[in-house]
Amino acid sequence: MEKKIDIISIADDVASLSMRSVLEYWNIKVDIHYVAKSQDLVDIFKKDSLSENLLLMCHGAEEGIHLPELDPAVAKTQPYDKVLTPDNLDEFLKLNGQTVVSIGCKTGTKALADAFLSKGAKEYIAPSSYPEGTASLLFTVNFYYFLLVKELPIKEAYTKAKLIDNETEMFELFRR
């Protein structure tokens, strides 16, 4: 069975390309989706062809997932502006048993996890605080190494990736 992952890049191109290179080196098929405006994200989550592994390369904060800054004229035409909240996700999110990993700071809240899990995600993994950016990338590389290369169960892959240092310990696992 072919191993696949969808990377959803919300204004984090360098980290997204780094992850793509690592995953493809491991012979994992990668589809990368670039988000320039909120409608792009809505359209991505309407696809029935998303793989069982979704990686959100994004930035976040207390209120939710940061969206790319837009010209005010363009922003008026979008369903969401500046931040995507758990309530916003509830309006359009449709998943089918995927494992969702988010690297965005503070996206590991119960509210965001509940939004993903209630809309069909099997697991949701994200940092509960503000890890240093390279630590988020390190956690993600290690998580997918243990999950997709070593084929460990999700809980074990998560635990091994989380135990690298204090920064990676900020990642939380939520399950349905």
Image (tube, rainbow, N blue to C red):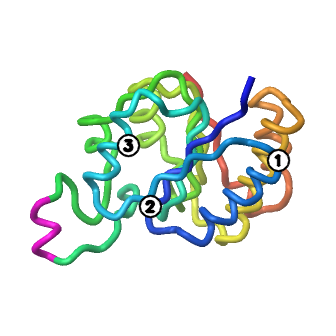
In the drawing, what numbered circle is on residue 10? 2
For the residues labelled 3 and 2, the Cα–Cα distance comes to 12 Å
Q: Residue at x 59, y 44 (%)?
A: 101
Q: Which mark is residue 44?
A: 3
User: What stretch of residues is rendered in magenta?
Assistant: 72-77
Q: What is the chief secondary structure element of the magenta stretch?
A: helix
Q: Residues within 10 Å of mark 2 (few under 14, many from 20)?
A: many
User: In the figure, 54 relative to 62: above or below?
Assistant: above
> Looking at the image, is mark 1 or mark 2 nearer the viewer?
1
Disc 1 from disc 2: Cα separation:
24 Å
Q: Which residue is mark 1?
A: 26
Residue 39 in magenta? no
Residue closer to the observer: 112 or 7: 7
Q: Residue furthest bottom?
A: 71
Identity of the amino acid at label 2? Ile
The crowding category of the residue bearing disc 1, from other C-alpha atoms within 10 Å (few below 14, some 14 to 19, many at least 20), is: some
Residue neighbourhood size for the residue with mark 3, other residues' Cα within 10 Å, grouped as few (<14), some (14–19), many (≥20): some
